[in-house]
Amino acid sequence: MDEVFKALADPSRRALLDSLNASNGQTLRELCAGLDMARQSVSKHLAVLEEAGLVSTVRRGREKLHFLNAAPVHEIAHRWISRYDQARVEALADLKLALEEAPAFVYTTYIRTTPRELWRALTDPAFTRRYWATELTTDWSAGSPMTWDNHGVLISDPGQVVLAAEPYTRLSYTWHAITPELARRFGWDDELRARLAGEPRSKVTFTIEEAGRVVKLTVVHDGFEPGSRLAEMAGQGWPGVVASLKSLLETGEPLPDDT
């Protein structure tokens, strides 16, 4: 936590976060163009922010995109907001909210586990049921169909497929379909269900990397259209899911399920 506060203490680094807040997923060139800072200075500040966990990077072809990472802010909000006046942490809350509503959701966390156990936790229905109330049925081969059991609602659709499955390294699949049964389960009205069902199918990618005695997990949920309501909902849901996954692997117990 000390690294997060130290990173936020520098006005130049806050300016970089503000730039990503306004337009998430920028390249180094784009960040330099929008700020009165030398390229070398921007690179150094980004390294500090990434080390603190406030920025995550994702490679798209030859480009390296920079995203705000909600994990440290989420932890600060969870630990401190309930103990102090809301207005005193309004900037942090706004940063968290802005990320959660971004068209591409990127979330990085570190878990005391092994790549093998984390892979199992992402693919074994016995694990996913405990921290996510969701089971995924598939053979985990690229191109294979998936059946979701999402909070007791079965969802099968030809568009639900595994995109990539590299054991202990990378897992990617398309997001589930929006069905009337799912809408009833979560209390969505007809207008919201129609809006969600009309959006293009998104995808989620989990990247697993060893980092000393812990494992770095990066979750990228993208493929949303501008102004996506699904993006907003995904951003609100993923921090809790990942936190519960982390708790299960590190303590043997997921976080309490409030749904």
Image: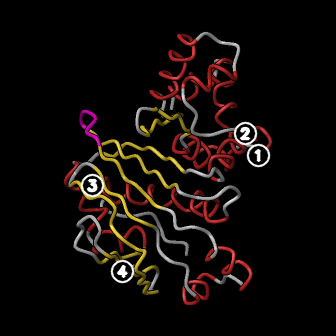
CB within 8 Å, label 2 to label 1: yes
Query: Which residue occupies the extreme front position in the image?
Result: 61
Q: How crowded is mark 2: few (under 14 residues within 10 Å), some or many (20 or more)?
A: some
The residue indicated by pointer 3 is 118
- Horizontal and vertical percent position of residue 88: 77, 37
CA distance separating discs 2 and 1: 6 Å
- The residue lying at 71 percent from left, 84 percent from top is 189
Label 3 sits on what residue type?
Answer: Leu
Amino acid type for the residue under numbered disc 4: Thr
At label 2, the amino acid type is Val
Between the residue at mark 3 and the residue at mark 1, the CA separation in whole angstroms equals 35 Å
Q: Is mark 4 on a helix, strand or loop?
A: strand
Q: Nearer the viewer, mark 4 or mark 1?
A: 4
**Depth order, front residue of 2/160:** 160
- Checking the image for residue 136, the label placed there is none
- Mark 1 element type: helix
Q: How far apart are marks 4 and 1 (CA)?
A: 42 Å
Disc 1 marks which amino acid? Gln
User: Which segment did they paint magenta?
Assistant: 209-213
| Closer mark to the observer between disc 3 and disc 4 | 4
- Per the picture, the main secondary structure of the magenta-coloured stretch is strand
Residue corresponding to mark 4: 147
Q: Is residue 147 above or below residue 92?
A: below
According to the picture, the residue beneath numbered tag 2 turns out to be 89
Q: Reading the chain from its start, which is encountered first: label 4 or label 1? A: 1
> How many residues crowd around disc 3 within 10 Å: few (fewer than 14), some, or many (20 or more)?
many
Whether residues under marks 3 and 4 lie with C-beta atoms below 8 angstroms apart, the answer is no
Q: Which residue is drawn at 58% across and 41% down?
A: 73
